[in-house]
Amino acid sequence: MKTIDRIPTSKIQRATKLIQTGAKVGVNYVKYYGEKLISTEEKAKENLNESNAEDIYNGLKTMKGSALKVAQMLSMEKSILPRAYVEKFSLAQFSVPPLSPPLVVKSFKNYFGKHPSEIFDSFNLTSINAASIGQVHQAEKNGQKLAVKIQYPGIAESISSDLALVKPIAMKMFNIKGANSERYFKEVEDKLTEETNYILEFDQSIEIASACEQIPNLKFPNYYKEFSSERILTMSWMDGIHLSEFTSKPLNQEISNKLGQALWDFYMFQIHHLKKVHADPHPGNFLVNNKGELIVIDFGCMKSIPDEFYIPYFELAKKENINNPTYFEEKLYELEILREDDSEGEIVFFKKLFHEMLSLFTQPFHQDEFDFSDPEFFEKIAELGSKYAKSSELKEMNGNRGSKHFIYINRTFFGLYNLMFDLKATNVKINRYSPKL
């Protein structure tokens, strides 16, 4: 794969790159309108989506950082984005053009004052995996194989300017209005900033791995402080294949069930016992070893869950509360889904929307065991997402609603459900590490 010798880091450079990408998308729309005249609407739209997905991804992958991270997050929205975008943006999880060897050496000299060959017994200057914020290299020290994650230069400093560039697009896309909208962007900015702090990730990795080590069929790397810094993180090399590669092959049901149970238990233990959670559940953050065990390899994105959100959120996972109109409305206000300045029409609309969503989405919690291979369950989720994505009524209403904590908690559950479905895990015990809801 072609390497990158330079990443645009200034606000002007990155804005220029986005403008160039936008121009290509504009040309694609001109082609689309022409193609509609000589082809079918469906075929023309499919070609438009493929062209736009290709051009947008190609623009973002040279920028890396938060811009590419947003694409990675969007790739998990399988029920919302067109297939072409999901397929292309999912490459941001672990397959983007890596830094060239000279830039890798420069990073080591910046943070350790040494060439990597002076620190390790051996160091492969060609990366093994490259993602949105950093890339991984294989090294060896005292007979121990290591994975060394190096952050791309300038990424941490460009987060605020990147988000400022995409903010107007996001506000229009999600119909966000009003003075309080800034809290959502601040939540995303804070989390992305945390992801660039590898000292914080080191501490989080040690904490969560230690707390979750008793969960069956779950493994974690060891971490090495002496070979880590604010922008470089070193851990033991874990042999295995990415979860997406595992699920792309014919599945062994017994192994799938074992992995699915480990994944579910990992998330429920964190949420209910630690009140914090690994909020980046995409396949690039998990490996499967030859023993059929699940390996967690990235703790950059951790979300703490305050009681004022945790309590009403999981109260609404209880079937009897969803079906109690007075109690249900009370909790919607607590979670800021309903607002004091809502019109009667908005109250009726959002009560109905969230009753539909929660009645469906919380079904696994109402059973002792759940079959995550059930296509009907996931088809209903996709249909519901599609229904409201096309809702003209929703587009006219203020999308500025809901606690800021929804952004990463909902992302966690959507990502977790998608991974469980990809594994086709059946007979998953729901309440081993969570209170029965």
Image (cartoon, rainbow, N blue to C red):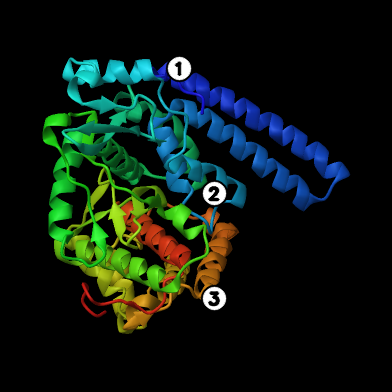
Q: Which residue is mark 2?
A: 86
Disc 3/disc 2 C-alpha distance (Å): 21 Å
Q: Is residue 176 visible?
A: no
Tag 3 and tag 2, C-beta contact below 8 Å: no
Rendered location of residue 110, percent (x, y)? 22, 16
Q: Which residue is found at the position 38% from the left and 17% from the top?
A: 10
Q: Is label 1 in a helix, a strand or a loop?
A: helix
Q: Nearer the viewer, residue 296 or 380?
A: 296
Disc 3/disc 1 C-alpha distance (Å): 46 Å
Which amino acid does the dot numbered 2 rest on? Answer: Val
Q: Is label 3 in a helix, a strand or a loop?
A: helix
| Horizontal relation, residue 39 to residue 391: left or right | right
Q: Which residue is found at the position 40% from the left and 50% from the top?
A: 241
The disc at residue 376 is 3
Rendered location of residue 149, percent (x, y)? 29, 34
* Residue 282 higher or lower than 347, as above or below: above
Disc 2/disc 1 C-alpha distance (Å): 27 Å
Which amino acid does the dot numbered 3 rest on? Answer: Glu
The disc at residue 87 is none
Examine the image and state in which quarter residue 255 appears: bottom left
Q: Which residue is mark 1?
A: 13
* Residue count near mark 1 (Cα–Cα under 10 Å), binned few <14, some 14–19, many ≥20: few
